[in-house]
Amino acid sequence: MKESISTTQKLEDTFKKEVKKQLEAAKEYMHAGWGVEDLTTIENFHLRHITEDCVKQYGEEEVLQKQGKFEHASANRIQLPQEIVLRWLYELYGISKNELIIHQSSVVWDMEDNTMHEFDRDDYVGPKKKIKELEAKGKHSIGQLSPVSSEFKEYIRRLREKAQIPEKG
């Protein structure tokens, strides 16, 4: 009997550690990708609930993988923070993954000077020109990213702010 209690306790501890790890990764993703910081109590509650649900689902997939009934449980684990934040954004604010893609911008990052040059998502020429310009200056540490636009980050900020204002009635 003691052995099953010990095993159950170990499983619960492992689950709690994984939830904590994925919760921190999701918060970091939200901060880096969307500029979201200082979650409200309600936002934190939903983020934790979604994280627990995703970790539980991953655990079930891992069991199925060990039984040979599921192939890609480990690949899904890598995507957990992204899935968590996308579900959070959709469940709390109704913003889907497709809407995020629409609001992506193109960024050329001069890693030597740590400066970012943002371009409109539909501007295919600007980033290429900027990369050539930086290379002509002898810069070799250049990266190109596709984060959400600064306008979208501002939209998220305003949406979150508006959600915290009590309705008059």
Image (spheres, grey):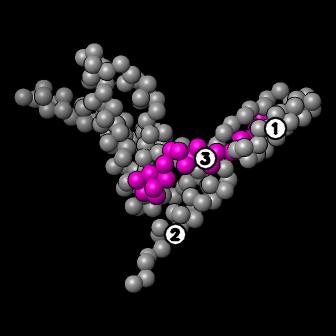
Please, what is the three-letter code of the amino acid marked with disc 2? Lys
Spatial CA distance of label 2 from label 1 is 37 Å
Q: Residue at x 6, y 28 (%)?
A: 1
Residue 121 image offset from top left, x and y in percent: 70, 44
To which quarter of the image does residue 71 belong?
A: top left
Which residue, given by chain and number where applicable, does mark 1 sit on? 125
Residue 21 appears anywhere in the view: yes
Q: Which residues are magenta?
A: 89-114
Q: Are marks 3 and 1 in contact (CB under 8 Å)?
A: no
Q: Residue at x 81, y 38 (%)?
A: 125
Q: Residue at x 25, y 36 (%)?
A: 12
Q: Secondary structure at mark 1?
A: helix
Q: Quadrant of the C terminus?
A: bottom left
Which residue, given by chain and number where applicable, does mark 2 sit on? 162
Spatial CA distance of label 2 from label 3 is 22 Å
Which residue, given by chain and number where applicable, does mark 3 sit on? 102
Depth check, front residue: 124 or 45: 124
Residue 24 appears anywhere in the view: no
Please, what is the three-letter code of the amino acid marked with disc 3? Ile
